[in-house]
Image (spheres, grey):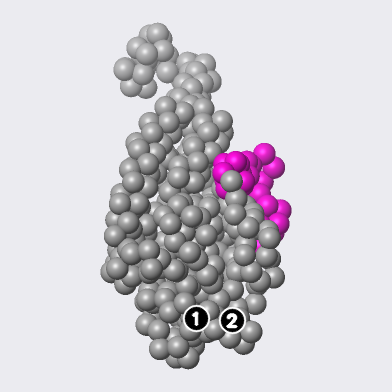
Amino acid sequence: MPKSLGQKMGVAVNQRRSARLIPAIVPIVALTLGAAAFAQPAPQPTIVTSFSILEDFARQIAGEGADVRVLAPVGAEVHEWELVPQNFIDLEEADVLFYNGYDLETWLPQAEATLAEGALAVAVAEETGYETLPITLGEFEGAPDPHLWMDPRAAVRYVEVMRDALVAADPESAATYEANAAAYLAELEALYEELREQLGAIPAANRLLVTSEAALLYYAAAFGFEHEGIWGSNAETEGTPEQIIRVVTLVREREPAALFWESTISDRYVQSVADETGTPVAGPLYVDSLGEAGTGAESYLELQRANAALLVETLR
């Protein structure tokens, strides 16, 4: 047996007595190894998020201190996502599930049913207490619009809710979560002022946003736009003849500078309106998902800046 190990155990070991001492040493070695294993850092918590906006927020708060996963990946339409086998694995392993709430994730019951007992599920938007705006048209008219994150001031509240949930679930890492969140919250607060100044360059006469889904209500309220969509929510039937006719009539009356489409939806619906009215089409705007690599919208901060740059370029 190595001398160094014998010294650590306080046992005088020599070759003549080794055979007799082995039975006594084995339990001590096992105890030492068990203590060493117990002293290892706790495994990282597994954070599962419903879509890429929340994934980005979670990564900003947790840093390298957690395993962050997403169900509806970048580019996916979160309203209509269908869970895939990897999603079920992620949900079964989740310590925390962050989802938006307000019926954004129509598939949520299936996800919650898969969570392990004791896992924490947080409806982030609902927990913010941020004042909601109603969906203005379509099958869900009057229900709370779920796209609160499009107002950076609401995004601040999202991050605060997620920070507090992670501190409660993993108090040993509380200092990390709080420090990371504080730095990111400062960026979000500065972002709102940055966008307000940038978008202020758009003349009042051009401040009508016409999109596929009317998902920019909070954005419009934050930055002084009027907003119309072909339909009210991506959870409803999209692009019906009645919807198209209504917006064609609106566009002919109001003559907006452009029509916009979103990254998770085909542009064919706004293109149909454009063909009837001669109005230019611009896009994409990023709303329900971050952008793919190379789009310049790969994070929430970049998403907001990319949208603002497009609006200023198109509407000014």
Q: Give the residues in magenta.
A: 105-130
Q: Position of residue 150 (x, y in %)?
A: 47, 55
Q: Nearer the viewer, residue 239 or 105?
A: 239
- Seen in the picture, residue 98 relative to 249 is either above or below; the reply is above
Q: Nearer the viewer, residue 79 or 208?
A: 208
Q: Position of residue 99 (x, y in %)?
A: 58, 51
Q: Residue at x 45, y 42 (%)?
A: 156
Quadrant where the C terminus is found in the figure: bottom left
Q: Residue at x 59, y 81 (%)?
A: 246
Q: Position of residue 161 (x, y in %)?
A: 53, 38
- Looking at the rendered structure, the kind of residue marked 2 is Arg
Task: Point out which mark residue 87 bears.
Answer: none
Task: Point out which mark residue 253 bears.
Answer: 1
Task: Give me the C-alpha separation between circle 2 and circle 1.
Answer: 11 Å
Q: Residue at x 48, y 32 (%)?
A: 42
Q: Residue at x 43, y 49 (%)?
A: 152
One can see residue 95 in this view = no
- Looking at the rendered structure, the kind of residue marked 1 is Glu
Q: Nearer the viewer, residue 106 or 170?
A: 106
Q: Secondary structure at mark 2?
A: helix
Q: Residue furthest bottom?
A: 276
- Seen in the picture, residue 136 relative to 3 is either above or below; the reply is below
